[in-house]
């Protein structure tokens, strides 16, 4: 399995949290130790990510406010482009994988714009400006520390998921014009989420 110890039973997908759920606004806590529970959570997050056709997932999106993300931006069966960054060459062949306490040490001044979506903001998309390369520091589930430059789609996904760990949704990165365009749908999603939470508490 990828970056985790196999469990006796198949990992089950977890319920996704949507915009309007307070946990998505919290700053997630640092992980201090790698435990069997953490490994199981990572496995479940990978299953959840894949079943929902996502390429990244952060623990707050499944109700856990800890600094853990899963990434699946590349199919290891496909070759990498010749200009792949060191991080892509290291991590893409191991995907899907989990990263513990990921942080961006620095970002390139070069940026690009790409439409982004989010499993916590379903069916709503918008163009987001992000750095084309970032310096990533993180730990894998086997305890190894990564400190490497990442580019391409991987860099964008890392920025998106690490934002989640700091309570930031991609819609906050939209220009005022693009934010206004999706504001109605976004408010409807938040209202529906809050109504569901209230109903479940009764």
Image (spheres, rainbow, N blue to C red):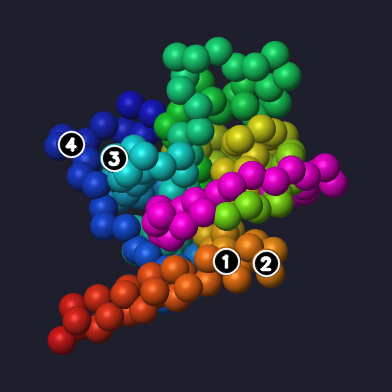
In the displayed structure image, the side of residue 123 where residue 161 appears, left or right: right
**Label 3, label 1: how far apart the Cα atoms are:** 29 Å
The residue at 31%/75% (across/down) is 192
Mark 2 nearby-residue class (10 Å; few <14, some 14–19, many ≥20): few
- Ranked by sequence position, the earlier of labels 1 and 4 is 4
**Label 4, label 2: how far apart the Cα atoms are:** 45 Å
**Label 1, label 2: how far apart the Cα atoms are:** 6 Å
- Ranked by sequence position, the earlier of labels 3 and 2 is 3
- Ranked by sequence position, the earlier of labels 3 and 1 is 3
Circle 4 — which element?
loop
Q: Position of residue 43 (x, y in %)?
A: 31, 40
As for residue 33 lying within the magenta part, the answer is no
Q: Are marks 1 and 2 in contact (CB under 8 Å)?
A: yes
Which of the 4 image quadrants contains residue 199? bottom left
The residue that label 3 is drawn on is 51
Residue 96 drawn above or below residue 137? above
Which of the 4 image quadrants contains residue 84? top right
Magenta stretch bounds: 103-125
Q: Position of residue 162 (x, y in %)?
A: 57, 54
Circle 3 — which element?
helix
The residue that label 2 is drawn on is 177
Q: Nearer the viewer, mark 3 or mark 4?
A: 3
Q: Nearer the viewer, mark 1 or mark 4?
A: 1
Mark 1 nearby-residue class (10 Å; few <14, some 14–19, many ≥20): few
The residue at 26%/53% (across/down) is 14
The residue that label 1 is drawn on is 181
Residue 59 versus residue 9: which sits nearer the camera? Answer: 59
The residue that label 4 is drawn on is 10
Residue 123 versus residue 55: which sits nearer the camera? Answer: 123
């Amino acid at each position: 399995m990828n970056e985790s110890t196999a469990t006796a039973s198949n990992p089950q997908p977890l319920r996704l949290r949507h915009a309007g759920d307070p946990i998505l606004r919290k700053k997630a806590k640092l992980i201090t130790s790698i435990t069997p529970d953490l490994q199981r959570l990572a496995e479940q997050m990978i299953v959840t990510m894949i079943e929902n056709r996502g390429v990244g997932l952060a623990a707050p999106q499944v109700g856990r406010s800890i600094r853990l993300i899963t990434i699946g931006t590349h199919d290891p069966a496909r070759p990498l482009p010749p200009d792949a960054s060191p991080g892509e060459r290291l991590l893409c062949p191991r995907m899907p994988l989990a990263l513990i306490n990921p942080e961006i040490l620095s970002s390139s001044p070069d940026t690009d714009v790409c439409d982004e979506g989010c499993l916590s903001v379903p069916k709503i998309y918008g163009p987001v400006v992000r750095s084309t390369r970032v310096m990533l520091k993180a730990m894998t589930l086997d305890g190894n520390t990564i400190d490497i430059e990442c580019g391409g789609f991987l860099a964008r996904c890392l920025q998106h998921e690490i934002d989640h760990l700091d309570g930031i949704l991609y819609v906050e990165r939209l220009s005022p014009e693009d934010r206004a365009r999706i504001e109605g749908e976004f408010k409807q999603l938040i209202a529906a989420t809050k109504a569901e939470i209230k109903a479940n508490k009764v």
